[in-house]
Amino acid sequence: MDEFLPADFDCSMAVRQEIIRKLKALEAVADELPVYIIHDVRHFSVMYMCPRGLQLLGVSLEDVRRLGSEYYTRFFNPDDVAFYLPKFMELLQNPDPPKWFSFFQQVTTGKGNGFEWYLSASRPFVFDEEGKPILSLTFALQLDPNHHLAEKAERLMEENLLLKNNYQRFASLTKREKELLQYIALGQKTAEISGRIHISEKTMHTHRRNIKRKIGAKTHYDIIKFAQAFNMV
């Protein structure tokens, strides 16, 4: 095994040389970069991680390579991974031209292996002779827990999880109910909404009750959170 690649890494000699060249270039300026990770996108395991990243996780390069897919369950919030990983894999299906994919993630680099927020960005890094990506590059920048971005990241992931878990509820709403849900979430009163769309207040009360039942909302705050997750307000 050389410094960067395991001996059994499946690629041509030309590709291997390109990988080593690129990783040496990153290593030369590693102290000036965020943590960086190289994934083998063919089975999305970690192929290489910079020394600072390994230190933060408390593992060796050999350890993290052996983990395979367990890497994600051991060091990351599984709800985050379930949201962003499929989106990045979809981007890899059409890598021309290569694009950056940015996302927030929670990583167990805190005290007692607690989660800390990172802003990360990934893109295809090395391609095979047929132009298919085989490696990706990810930069991970830790967020100051007292910075407003960490709070926004928390809210964003909550909304993403709400969206993922409630898509069927949203799909069950009629076109009219979605319109009314938006008005309700904006705080408009029954009389105001019924006057706007020319229905009786009694009918509006019925719509409101049906909407709350369909989306599983018990309070007005629940309605607002639901509407925000689906970009209605």
Image (cartoon, rainbow, N blue to C red):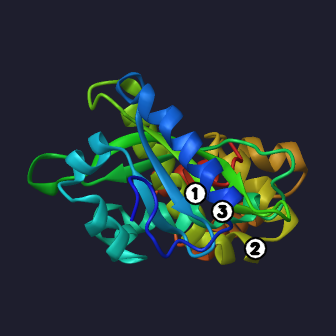
> Vertical placement of 79 versus 113: above or below?
below
Cα–Cα span, label 3 and label 1: 52 Å
**Is 137 left, or right, of 6 in this rendering?**
right
| Residue matched to label 3 | 13
Q: Amino acid at mark 1?
A: Phe
Specify few, some or many for label 3: CA neighbours under 10 Å numbering under 14, 14-19, or 20 or more. Answer: few
| Residue matched to label 2 | 171
Q: Amino acid at mark 2?
A: Ala
Counting residues from the start of the chain, the first of labels 1 and 2 encountered is 2
**Is 28 left, or right, of 20 in this rendering?**
left
- From the viewer's side, name the closer residue of 23 and 36: 23
**Is 211 left, or right, of 130 in this rendering?**
left
Note whether residue 172 is visible. yes
Specify few, some or many for label 2: CA neighbours under 10 Å numbering under 14, 14-19, or 20 or more. Answer: few
Cα–Cα span, label 1 and label 2: 13 Å
Query: Which circle, 3 or 1, is nearer the viewer?
Result: 3
Cα–Cα span, label 2 and label 3: 51 Å
Which secondary structure lies at badge 2? helix
Residue at position x 40%, y 58% from top? 2
Quarter-of-image position of residue 108: bottom left
Residue 130, horizontal then vertical, whole percent? 86, 65
Query: Which circle, 2 or 3, is nearer the viewer?
Result: 3
| Residue matched to label 1 | 226
Quarter of the image with the N terminus is bottom left
Residue at position x 42%, y 35% from top? 27
Which secondary structure lies at badge 3? helix
